[in-house]
Image: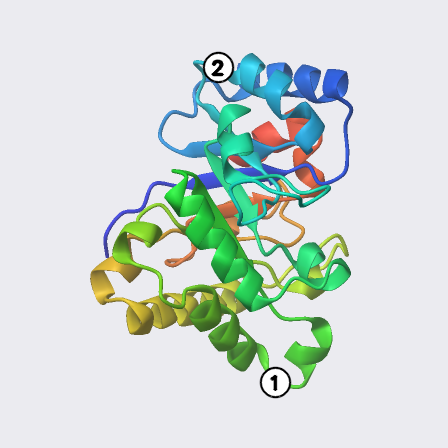
Amino acid sequence: MESRRPFIAGNWKMFKTCDEAEQTARELVALVAGATDRDVMIAPPFTALWPVAQALAGTNVGVGGQNLYWETEGAFTGEISPGMLTSAGCTHVIIGHSERRQYFRETDDAVNKKIKSAAAAGLKPVMCIGETEAEREAKKTFSVLDKQVKNGLQDLALNDVTNLTIAYEPVWAIGTGKTATSDQAQEAHAYIRNLVTECFDESVARAMRILYGGSVKPANIAELMSMADIDGALVGGASLEAKTFAEIVNF
C-alpha cells in the first residue's frame, strides 16, 4: 500500500471572533511546529480568514474556507466565491459538510459544482460524506456513501481530483460524543476507496487521502490513525482549543 501523508484539519464552524481566531491560530502554530511530517489545516469562519492567514503565513499550518459558491462572482447575496477564499489566504475549502447538507439543504449536485469550481481556482477541496443514524440503523450506510461519492465526483477530470480529499463523517457521531469504532470507520473508508477506484482508477484511489470526522479527540486519534485506510481527521469541537487540537495533530 502506498504511504499517504497524514492530514489533520480543524473545522471551527460558527465559533470565534477575528481576535479570538487569530489568538488561537498563533497558539496552535507554536504547539505544532514540529509536526512537519503531516499536513495541518484550520477552517475559521469567513470573517476571520484574513487575520488567521496572516498569523499562519510561513508556518506549517494552512487555512481553509468552510464553504463556497460555485460562481466566480455575481448577484448572490451572502455567498463567497473561490477567488475570494484564495485572496483571503485559503489553500483548502470544506465542501458538503453534513451541517450544510442538513440545515441548508445542500445537494450532491451542489457539492459537485462546488468541487469543480474550487479545483478550477486552485483550491484543495475536502468533500464531506456520511450517513445519518437512521440510515445506519436501516443498513443503508453503503448505499448512502455510494450515492454521495459517485454524484459528488461526477464528470470530474483527473486534474480536478489530484488535490481532493474525502472526509467520512458519520452524522450520528458529529458533536454527539459517539464515535464510530475503529473497525466501523475502517470498513467505511475501505468502501469509499473502492468507490474512488470505480470512479477513476486504482492509482487515484491509492493516492487519495480519506479523513475520519466525528467526535475525534486526543484519546482516540492514534487508534483511528492505525487503520489502513484512515489518513487523517476532520476535527470539529476538539479543534477550537489550541492545546487539544495540537494533541490530535501531534498524535
Gap in angstroms between the C-alphas marked 1 and 2:
45 Å
Q: How is the image coloured?
A: rainbow
Left of 222 or right of it: where is 22? right
**Residue 158 in picture, x, y percent from top left:** 27, 56
**Residue 123 in picture, x, y percent from top left:** 43, 39
What amino acid is found at the position of numbered circle 1 in the picture?
Lys
**Residue 78 in picture, x, y percent from top left:** 72, 41
Question: Mark 1 = which residue?
Answer: 139
Pointer 1: residues within 10 angstroms few (<14), some, or many (20+)?
few
For the question of whether residue 250 can be seen, the reply is no
Find numbered disc 1 in the image and state the secondary structure of the residue it sits on. Answer: loop
Find numbered disc 2 in the image and state the secondary structure of the residue it sits on. Answer: loop
In the rendered view, would you say 79 is above or below 138? above
Left of 34 or right of it: where is 108? right
Left of 195 or right of it: where is 185? right
Question: Mark 2 = which residue?
Answer: 57
N-term-proximal mark, 1 vs 2:
2
- Along the viewing direction, whichever of 212 and 131 lies nearer the viewer: 131
Q: Residue furthest front?
A: 75
In the rendered view, would you say 204 is above or below 38? below
Residue 74: quarter of image = top right
- Along the viewing direction, whichever of 46 and 190 lies nearer the viewer: 46
User: Which is in the foreground here, disc 1 or disc 2?
Assistant: 2
In the rendered view, would you say 104 is above or below 232? below
| Residue at x-position 67% and y-position 62% | 101
| Residue at x-position 49% and y-position 58% | 113
For the question of whether residue 106 can be seen, the reply is yes
What amino acid is found at the position of numbered circle 2 in the picture?
Ala
